[in-house]
Amino acid sequence: MISNFTNTFFPISSLAISIFICVLYFGRKNVKNKETKLYSILIICGLIESTYYVCLTFGVDLIYKDYMYSLFQYLNKVLGIIYLVWITLLFYYVVSIVSKNSNTLKKIKKILIFLTCIFSAIILVLPIEVWWDPKRYVSNSYGPSLNFLYTIFLVYLFVMFIITIINNKRKDLKGKFIPLYTLFVLIIISLIVRAFDPLFNITSNILSLVLLVMYHTIENPDLKMIEQLNLAKDQADKANRAKSDFLSSMSHEIRTPLNAIVGFSQALADEDLTEEAKEEVDDIIMASNSLLEIVNGILDISKIESEKLEIVNSEYEFQEVFDDLVALTKARMKDAPVDFRYHLDSSIPNVLYGDHTRIKQIILNLLTNAVKYTKQGYIDFTVSSIIKNDICRLIVSVEDSGIGIKEENISKLFDKFERLDLEKNITIEGTGLGLAITKKLVELMNGKIVVQSIYGKGSKFTVAIDQRITQKDHLEKKDEKIEVKNIDVSNKRVLIVDDNKLNLKVASHLLQGYNIITEEVESGFLCYDKISQGSTYDLIFLDDMMPKMSGVETLKKLKTINGFNTPVVVLTANAIVGMKDKYLKDGFDDYLAKPINKDELYKVIAKYLS
Ligand code: ADP
């Protein structure tokens, strides 16, 4: 009984493993590729083999009669053919993971099918002897048919062994040969065992164990898990998009009342006011400008996070950018007892190709911080370069003798909404967005930013960004600075289009200050009606974000009117960096951001009305 158990254990366990692999593999969604297709054929072949072997083991008692001997022989030959098919499939699997050439693989496949047919016929034709021991529940088969099968088996094993040796170092095949090594080792063990007891047959177990090992080495990611992960990612993306949309629409909504505050206080500042009232109006303007900076920061970061921010490259003059930065910083410093030193490396080519608006934003953030966090001493602004072929690596450093940053805070410096050392900085305005935006912009341009700081002594921010060198020395100026003080624009006619009454009021109030005649309409439709009915204007200010028909759509319609050539300036709260270029591309003649900056308004009026 015990010996019966040990001898039936192997076929049954082999069948159990085969069923287990099939359930494991077919019970889940699988990727469809050449490797998994071959693997599924292999495991089906393995299942057929082990089922057949179990039936043969248990059924032999019934058929092992003298008159059934030839049937038993025949059944054993069929088992031999199944082994042959299995090893051929494994061989083809190994060849297909090693070679990626589909034409070669097709040829090999045809040859293997042909060879398998021939070999199967030979196995069927050659004689076989079988022997059955009912006491031990075990059979043995031998003879030329099986010798031929073993020879084929060994040839395939030998070629596969050579293939594994040759491709052993290939990184893309890492782990793929483990089932083969398992096969080699188990076959050696089986041969040793059979040398002692020829009736001890574990071939079926070897095949199923190899397939089990292979289950873990084939490329078969868990599709269900991938689907769930994708779903979770989609949801997170949606939530992030909703947050960004909320932030940008909220910032946009803030701009409208802000436009009224800035506009009216600027108009008020020009009136005859008492000294005290004048100071208060200036404070209102300053506070509104700070609020505007915050709103712009939020718009920028939400745009970066929703990956909508693009780097727009064009040719620009670096000296001009540098001069602007110096002027802006000096203006910001006012009369602070801080020595502002600046130096521009003269070897930097004047005309560079890159996103100058973003470069300016990055450097201005660093300079603004230096001004904010330095009460006395110096601020050192240096731009140097390393030139290699047609690339100029700009190395910008902003060093200050300000409050410095604690070592433990340096790692948090670039996190958004992170303000450090609040007990000292509480009186300094800021949101903690500046450096987060700066770092993201630098990374978008494949640059690097580093910080060195000694708490209480000062900080140094260094940025390195590559820009392309063009062959030009200067660029043609499209937009010369206009002296706007003494212009006469009285009685010029301007149409203002905005869906918000308050915005209309602010704009017309500012324009009327120049004796300009203004008309206001509240939609793109009304604007189109007016122009198409023959009303003429010297200039149109057109809001973009209007319900039903946007400014861009209105402009498109206006351009279809015969003879229409009035300059159209977009007047929009959609004022994040980069929008100007977009609107100019859309066909607007110029761009004015809300809240309306008085100087910018002067420039536009001077350009189109004087
Ligand atoms: P904020 O709007 O608060 O200035 P930033 O992102 O620009 O936001 O800076 C984040 C924090 O890093 C600041 O709150 C400040 O504590 C610190 N910091 C930035 N620049 C400097 C500097 N030059 N010197 C000292 N501390 C700085």
Image (cartoon, grey):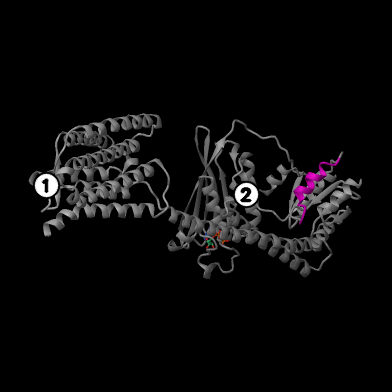
Q: At x 33% / y 32%, what residue is drawn?
A: 113
Which quadrant holds the C terminus? top right
Give the tally of numbered discs: 2
In the rendered structure, which disc, 1 or 2, sits on the residue that comes first in sequence? 1
**Would residue 543 appear left or right of 150 to someone viewing this image?**
right
Disc 1, SS: helix
Instruction: Using the rendered image of the protein, determine whether residue 486 is visible from the camera's viewpoint.
Output: no
Instruction: Give the x, y percent position of residue 223.
Output: 43, 52
**Would residue 88 appear left or right of 365 to someone viewing this image?**
left
State the residue position of label 2.
326
Q: Nearer the viewer, residue 343 or 505?
A: 505
Residue 193 is labelled as: 1
Instruction: Give the x, y percent position of residue 497.
Output: 82, 54
In the depicted structure, whether residue 353 falls above or below residue 274: above
Stretch of the chain drawn in magenta: 547-561
Q: Residues within 10 Å of mark 1 (few under 14, many from 20)?
A: some
| Real-space CA distance between mark 1 and mark 2, rounded to the nearest whole angstrom | 87 Å
Displayed quadrant of residue 255: bottom right
Disc 2, SS: helix
Instruction: Give the x, y percent position of residue 189.
Output: 15, 46
Q: Residues within 10 Å of mark 2 (few under 14, many from 20)?
A: some
- Inspect the image, locate mark 1, and give the three-letter code of the amino acid beneath it: Val
Q: Nearer the viewer, residue 543 or 128?
A: 128
Residue 279 is labelled as: none
